[in-house]
């Protein structure tokens, strides 16, 4: 819940002064261990949720961090998880929380039984050039939805069969989408094509799929950075989380003034 909404509910008498004060504390940090300090109110301060980066953390540590987030905020987003860690989370929270698993993205969202995400009205499209690019694209989709956006998903519509792109572009225009995330590996051409047609911001998401020299996303990254189509911003290779956050921030602000 954004600070503006908290203040509005205070004015409308829906919140007490004490409850409003509790919600808008700017720096609500909780030290869980020497390795983890939880930024519990990041979404209040920045509009983007705190997430747990699963790589490099032990399964037990992830479970404890997730437990604390559920207690305090009702939701925990955990990225870059192995199958073993996903299984551990399912075991630890089965029957105690909703466990939403996105295996392609290696991502889990845990929610308390009574947690309901606030819908903002923001509209995000996520386009995926090839099936190999789905993990990064799905990460962006999940994050944008968790930030309250409606997400349109279009997969396997790369430039090798450019005619597949046309129905997606038609839907984007008809649905009055606010921003598009375009994931592509190989030569990374799809974001440039999309940005040359639509009148909304495009976030290029380079993906580490390809052959040979610079085939782990570098070529796609360089191509997006060098695009001759204006209106493209680019995140780092495979950074679906970052792409989803930026897209949702843009879409949510657009929705506020729609």
Image (spheres, grey):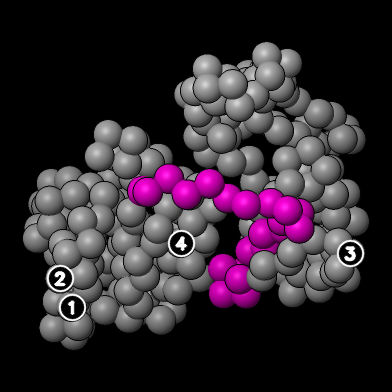
Q: Which mark is residue 92?
A: 3
Q: What element carries label 2?
A: helix
The residue to which callout 2 is attached is 170
The residue to which callout 1 is attached is 167
State the image quarter where residue 193 is shown: bottom left
User: Residue at the location (13% across, 57% down)?
Assistant: 198
User: Residue at the location (43% across, 45% down)?
Assistant: 120
Label 4 or label 3, whichever comes before in sequence order = 3
Verify CB contact (< 8 Å) between mark 3 and mark 2: no
Label 3 or label 2, whichever comes before in sequence order = 3
Verify CB contact (< 8 Å) between mark 1 and mark 2: yes
User: Residue at the location (63% across, 64% down)?
Assistant: 107
Q: Is the stretch drawn in magenta largely helix, strand or loop? A: loop
Q: Which mark is residue 141?
A: 4
Q: What element carries label 4?
A: helix
Mark-to-mark CA distance, 1 and 3: 43 Å
Residue 214 visible, this orientation:
no
User: Residue at the location (75% across, 25% down)?
Assistant: 29
- The residue range painted magenta reads 102-122
Q: Residue furthest front?
A: 13
């Amino acid at each position: 819940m954004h600070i503006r909404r908290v203040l509005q509910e205070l004015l409308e008498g829906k919140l007490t002064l004490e409850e409003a004060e509790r919600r808008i504390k700017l720096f609500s940090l909780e030290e869980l261990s020497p390795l983890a300090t939880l930024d519990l109110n990041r979404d209040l301060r920045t509009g983007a949720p705190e997430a747990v980066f699963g790589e490099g953390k032990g399964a037990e540590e992830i479970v404890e961090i997730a437990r604390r987030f559920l207690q305090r905020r009702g939701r925990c987003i955990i990225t870059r998880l192995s199958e073993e860690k996903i299984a551990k989370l399912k075991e630890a929270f089965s029957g105690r929380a909703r466990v939403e698993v996105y295996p392609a993205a290696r991502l889990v969202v845990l929610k308390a039984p009574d947690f309901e995400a606030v819908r903002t009205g923001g509209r995000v499209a996520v386009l995926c050039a090839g099936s190999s690019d789905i993990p990064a694209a799905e990460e962006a989709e999940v994050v944008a939805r968790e930030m309250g956006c409606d997400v349109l998903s279009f997969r396997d519509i790369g430039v090798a069969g450019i005619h597949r792109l046309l129905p997606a572009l038609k839907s984007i225009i008809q649905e009055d989408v606010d921003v598009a995330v375009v994931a592509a590996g190989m030569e990374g051409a799809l974001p440039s094509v999309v940005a040359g047609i639509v009148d909304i911001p495009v976030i290029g998401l380079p993906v580490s799929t390809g052959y040979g020299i610079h085939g782990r996303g570098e070529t796609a990254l360089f191509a997006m950075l060098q695009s001759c189509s204006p209106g493209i911003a680019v995140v780092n290779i495979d950074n679906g989380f970052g792409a989803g956050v930026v897209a949702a921030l843009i879409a949510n602000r657009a929705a506020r003034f729609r």
